[in-house]
């Protein structure tokens, strides 16, 4: 047992004896909690987080690859060095292989087209008339015939996944999706593989509008969509689970507080912000909290396969026993929490409403900064499967995102130690408040 832990235990023993000998009311949990938070803050080290990010960003941690496994091995080694037993939870998934080539040809069009495939665009070659289908909603196909043809739609009213499915259900053989003005076209996904998908290519706003202008003739315009080499393979990823058991048996000791982050990244991106930053903070929280006596279990989770559809967190939640699911009272998800070029800290829930996590974090934030933090809507990270399973959960993220999100420029030189430390303090303080033995108003 470390000297840090001995000091805590001695203080708690002294408090208990004092309460037993005194005719007054028993000592409140609050002084003990304040001692715990102060000691935790003193233990936090921004350099540890930065060093972890440096190690994790030596190469991209693409889901299902050896580099992702090496990252998992590094995290497991670190956790074990802190005294944790690490459970490696492996799972299989369908891995998307990007196209080897793609082309878009439009009869009679003299401009330049630079189409991009979405993640999960399927292979195929389709030649047919190009038909404008508005915003690609189901209702947009009611009065037009796209059977065997190529639909062209504006991506403004629904998800890319729905755009492709709607076109396929209407009978289209392929789809061209042009983006809102100013949106890049090389960073987007259809979410996950779907057997109902048809070949889909993306165009910039200007290219899409140019094609539509070209179609304003009395003669139908034909085009050819070609995507080659995309396929779905079987692959394996893994979650890491480290448990901090409660130090005291109370009525609340069966409850579970979860703190997690995904550690995989996208192709060609070192992933310093997304999401070595969140991973490094959770790792440091595990180290700094290991010797702080608590009344509830804390689970530190490191998810694989987030970038291909939240697969790691979905798998973890699907394996929870009914008892553990019932006792899981809060999930803190850290994703992109260190970028010096991103906006202010935001806390997001799937539906934008407050819950146990946001209330605890809002209180901690206000105590640390003297003003409130915004609660927003967001469902594109690993808190989502937890909240959908009925577990209070929230995402911690600096928002708006940096412009180099999902790019080779997501490097460690753009990480702010101050932002890392800020999130670590807020989440750690919130977790300690929730793991105190007394009942709260959350």
Image (cartoon, rainbow, N blue to C red):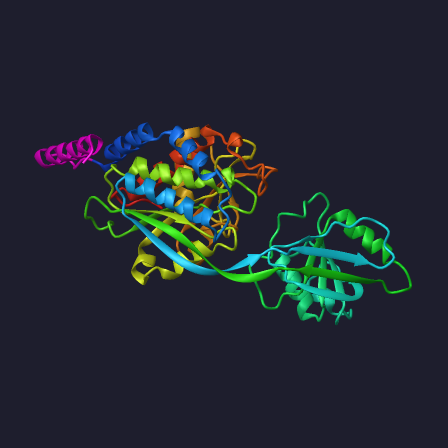
Q: Give how far across and how far down residue 362 sits, in percent.
A: 43, 38
- Image quarter of residue 104: bottom right
Q: Which residues are magenta?
A: 1-27
Q: Main secondary structure of the magenta part?
A: helix
Q: Give how far across and how far down residue 20 sits, in percent.
A: 10, 37
Residue 237 left/right relative to 267: left
Q: Give how far across and how far down residue 111 sits, in percent.
A: 84, 49
- Image quarter of residue 78: top left
Q: Is residue 221 magenta?
A: no
Question: Looking at the image, which is closer to me, 21 or 198?
Answer: 198
Question: 385 above or below 265?
Answer: below
- Image quarter of residue 211: bottom right
Q: Is residue 13 magenta?
A: yes
Is residue 154 visible to us here? no
Question: 377 above or below 371?
Answer: below
Question: Looking at the image, which is closer to me, 209 or 102?
Answer: 102
Which residue: 57% across, 57% down? Answer: 97
Which residue: 75% across, 71% down? Answer: 148
Q: Give how far across and how far down residue 77 sits, in percent.
A: 33, 42
Is residue 108 visible to us here? yes
Question: Looking at the image, which is closer to me, 289 or 91?
Answer: 91
**Count of number-bearing discs:** 0
Name the outermost residue toward the right. Answer: 218
Residue 22 left/right relative to 270: left
- Identify the image quadrant of the N terminus: top left
Question: 148 above or below 4?
Answer: below
Question: 41 above or below 350?
Answer: above
């Amino acid at each position: 047992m470390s000297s840090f832990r001995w000091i805590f235990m001695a203080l708690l023993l002294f408090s208990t004896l004092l309460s037993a000998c005194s005719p007054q009311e028993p000592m409140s949990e609050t002084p003990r909690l304040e001692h715990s938070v102060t000691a935790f803050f003193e233990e936090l080290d921004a350099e540890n987080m930065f060093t972890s990010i440096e190690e994790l960003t030596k190469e991209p941690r693409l889901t299902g690859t050896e580099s992702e496994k090496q990252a998992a091995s590094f995290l497991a080694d670190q956790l074990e060095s802190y005294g944790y037993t690490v459970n490696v939870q492996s799972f299989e998934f369908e891995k998307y292989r990007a196209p080897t080539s793609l082309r878009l040809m439009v009869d009679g069009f003299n401009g330049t087209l630079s189409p991009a495939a979405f993640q999960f665009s399927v292979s195929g070659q389709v030649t047919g008339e190009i038909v404008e289908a508005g915003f690609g909603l189901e209702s947009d196909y009611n009065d037009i015939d796209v059977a065997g043809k190529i639909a062209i739609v504006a991506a403004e009213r629904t998800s890319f996944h729905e755009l492709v499915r709607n076109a396929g259900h209407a009978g289209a053989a392929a789809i061209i999706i042009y983006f809102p003005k100013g949106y890049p076209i090389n960073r987007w996904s259809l979410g996950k593989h779907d057997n109902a998908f048809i070949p889909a290519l993306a165009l910039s706003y200007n290219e899409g509008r140019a094609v539509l202008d070209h179609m304003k003739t009395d003669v139908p315009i034909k085009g050819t969509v070609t995507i080659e080499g995309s396929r779905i393979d079987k692959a394996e990823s893994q979650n890491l689970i480290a448990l901090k058991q409660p130090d005291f048996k109370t009525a609340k000791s069966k409850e579970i507080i979860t703190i997690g982050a995904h550690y995989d990244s996208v192709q060609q991106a070192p992933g310093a912000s997304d999401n070595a930053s969140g991973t490094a903070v959770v790792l440091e929280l595990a180290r700094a909290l290991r010797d702080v006596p608590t009344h509830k279990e804390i689970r530190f989770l490191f998810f694989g396969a987030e970038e291909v559809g939240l697969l790691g967190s979905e798998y973890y939640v699907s394996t929870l026993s009914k008892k553990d699911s019932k006792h899981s009272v809060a999930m803190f998800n850290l994703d992109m929490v260190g970028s010096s070029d991103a906006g202010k800290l935001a806390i997001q829930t799937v539906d934008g409403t407050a819950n146990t996590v946001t209330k605890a974090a809002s209180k901690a934030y206000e105590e640390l900064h003297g003003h409130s933090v915004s609660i927003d809507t967001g469902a594109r990270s690993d808190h989502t499967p937890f909240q959908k399973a009925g577990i209070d959960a929230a995402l911690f993220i600096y928002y708006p995102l940096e412009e180099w999100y999902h790019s080779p420029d997501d490097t460690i030189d753009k990480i702010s130690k101050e932002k890392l430390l800020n999130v670590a303090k807020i989440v750690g303080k919130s977790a300690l408040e929730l793991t105190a033995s007394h009942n709260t108003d959350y």
